[in-house]
């Protein structure tokens, strides 16, 4: 399979093609994963999340260039809220990151397609392809939209939460579930007014927690704090290596459960579409001769015989 040879060499065309297969062709995806799986799992995954408009793409663009100078080989996967019209990813991120792409970093947008499970699946496997191609770290960028956040922290070895002084009622934003997941908190766009209040608020809320996260100010415009951020990430990559094995064992368990549940769900969907018992109780429910719970229990019993 020549594709795998090119993939191993880190050729862009091969990576792009393989990730497209992973996203769109499950049968082929399974064949590829079977061949590369043993040679994956060695890269540190950095998740970068935070409210829309926090300036994540521009920050990642600059940080990736700095990390490259520190001797790492980063790649970026940006999870885009799907554009509903085409179902593809909105590629604004790619435009903002053109500078780092020119420096040899691989950047790819993944459409979130609205389903959290689907994000995990294509994300996990896209990460594996980049690992096989020799990238480390792999940076995942996601828009702060509740559920995806927590999923990112499940997949990432290092989680970075980015705020900026303009994200509205910033303290409320901070409270909203992001306080438990970050290893690093960044107040970005620190050239804007309101930076110091936000920085102090983050310190008050998050600084005393047991995890003792790093809290930083960065400004892409003034190019300040970027190198410091890159160095902290590089040091963290080394320290997180120790825990990675253990974390990966848990992640593989979660992934296996996901796959089994997904397989069963697909099978049951198929069965229900052709199941006589299902249509019988559906009719009874529609005529209100039976309540939904009783109907559900009876159908479940008949399926599990």
Image (cartoon, helix red, strand yellow):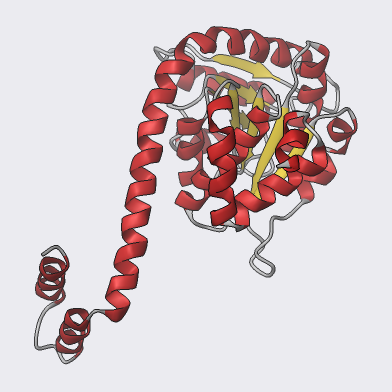
Determine which quarter of the picture holds residue 257.
Answer: top left
Work out whether 158 lies above or below 148: above
Give residue 215's quadrant in the image: top right
Q: Front-most of 271 and 78?
A: 271
Q: Please give left or right for residue 245 compared with residue 122 in the image.
A: left
Tell which residue pokes out farthest to the bottom in this image: 287
Q: Is residue 168 above or below residue 293?
A: above
Q: Is residue 126 toward the left or the right of residue 7 in the image? A: left
Note whether 284 is above or below 114 in the view shown.
Answer: below
Q: Is residue 169 visible?
A: no
Q: Position of residue 234 (x, y in %)?
A: 67, 12
Instruction: Decide which of 224, 72 is in the foreground and name it.
Output: 72
Image quarter hosting the C terminus: bottom left
- Residue at 60% x, 35% y: name it: 127
Evaluate whether residue 302 shows in this view. Answer: yes
Q: Position of residue 174 (x, y in %)?
A: 51, 32
Q: In which quadrant of the rendered image does the N terminus lie?
A: top right
Q: Position of residue 142 (x, y in %)?
A: 61, 41
């Amino acid at each position: 399979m020549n594709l795998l040879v090119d993939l191993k060499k880190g050729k862009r065309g091969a990576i792009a093609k393989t990730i497209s297969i992973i996203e769109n062709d499950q049968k082929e995806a399974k064949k590829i994963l079977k061949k590369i799986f043993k040679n994956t799992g060695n890269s540190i995954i950095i998740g970068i999340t935070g409210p829309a408009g926090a300036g994540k793409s521009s920050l990642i663009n600059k940080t990736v260039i700095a990390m490259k100078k520190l001797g790492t080989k980063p790649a970026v996967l940006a999870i885009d809220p799907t554009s509903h019209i085409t179902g593809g990813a909105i590629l604004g991120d790619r435009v903002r990151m053109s500078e780092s792409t020119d420096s040899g970093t691989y950047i790819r947008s993944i459409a979130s397609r609205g389903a959290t499970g689907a994000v995990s699946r294509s994300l996990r496997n896209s990460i594996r392809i980049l690992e096989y191609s020799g990238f480390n770290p792999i940076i995942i960028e996601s828009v702060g939209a509740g559920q995806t956040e927590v999923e990112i922290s499940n997949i990432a070895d290092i989680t970075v939460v980015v705020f900026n002084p303009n994200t509205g009622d910033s303290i409320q934003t901070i409270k909203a579930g992001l306080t438990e997941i970050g290893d690093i908190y960044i107040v970005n766009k620190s050239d804007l007014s309101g930076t110091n209040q936000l920085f102090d608020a983050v310190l008050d809320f998050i600084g005393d927690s047991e995890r003792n996260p790093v809290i930083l100010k960065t400004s892409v415009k003034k190019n300040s704090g970027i190198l410091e951020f890159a160095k902290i990430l590089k040091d963290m990559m080394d320290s997180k290596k120790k825990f990675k094995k253990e974390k990966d064992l848990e992640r593989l368990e979660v992934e296996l459960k996901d796959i089994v549940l997904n397989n069963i769900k697909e099978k049951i969907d198929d069965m229900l579409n052709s199941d006589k018992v299902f249509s019988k109780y559906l009719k009874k429910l529609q005529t209100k001769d039976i309540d939904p719970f009783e109907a559900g229990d009876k159908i479940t019993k008949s399926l599990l015989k």
